[in-house]
Amino acid sequence: MKRNSLSSFSLLQASDCEMQWVIRISVVVVGMVGTALSFLDSSVLVFWLVGADMSYTIMFPQLVCILFCKLSNGYGASVGYMIAIFIRILSGEPLIGLPPAIRFPGCRLDAEGVLTQYFPFRTTIMVMSLVSILLFSWLGSIVFNKDLLSEKWDVFR
């Protein structure tokens, strides 16, 4: 590994060969995990739908902030990600048998005995994540730009 100095500390950089091996191993591991997940349920469509749902509620606000909001930073992105994941898990998913812990308005018991959310909770979670990214990015920039915390605590620089 090569050492490369950047300001007052040094970073280790992986060689091209090491990077290729990391990519190869990652592809194999992710492929094996995906294959294992497809054996858990009779339909791969369920995993596709859950993945699309997660992309909308968790990743879409991140993308919007990166592309259109100069204010956004790593602190807001981290908090927004955690809030979105936490609320999304608590709101339940009937496709994988996860009951809702948070019952949004209009949550009703179906004929099969399954609680179903009729409120647009996915869009609500997406908006909450977007707002929290912007809010915590703004708070993070104030804390470090006004020297309320030392720069050595700024892990995202």
Image (cartoon, grey):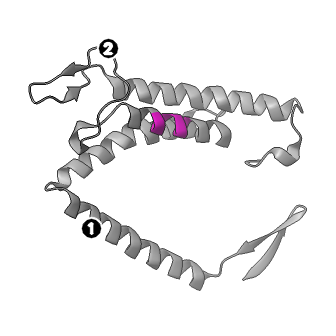
Mark 2 = which residue?
Answer: 105
Residue positioned 87% across, 29% down in the render: 146
Q: Quadrant of residue 118?
A: top left
- Looking at the picture, how far across and down is residue 93, in whole percent? 28, 37
Q: Residue furthest top?
A: 105
Position of 4 compared to 16: left or right? Answer: right
Mark 1 or 2: the one toward you: 2
| Whether residue 11 can be seen here | yes
* The quarter of the displayed image where residue 92 is located: top left
Where is 6 relative to 2, above or below?
A: above
| Direction from residue 76 to residue 101 in the image, left or right | left
Q: Is residue 135 magenta?
A: no
Are the residues at dot 1 and dot 2 in contact (C-beta closer than 8 Å)? no
Decide: few, some or many residues near mark 1? Use Cα within 10 Å; few <14, some 14-19, many ≥20. Answer: few
The kind of residue tagged 1 is: Thr
Side of 38 relative to 74 (left or right): left
Instruction: Measuring from the top left, give residue 72's x and y in whole percent.
Output: 64, 35
**Mark 2 belongs to which amino acid?**
Pro
97 with respect to 143 (left or right): left
Q: Is residue 24 above or below residue 60?
A: below
Give the main secondary structure, helix, strand or loop, of the magenta stretch.
Answer: helix
- Outermost residue, front side: 113
Q: Residue at 37% of width from left, 26% of height from top?
A: 123
* Magenta span: 80-86
Residue sitting nearer the eye, 114 or 121: 114
**Labelled disc at residue 155:** none
Name the residue tied to disc 1: 35
- Mark nearer the N terminus (1 vs 2): 1
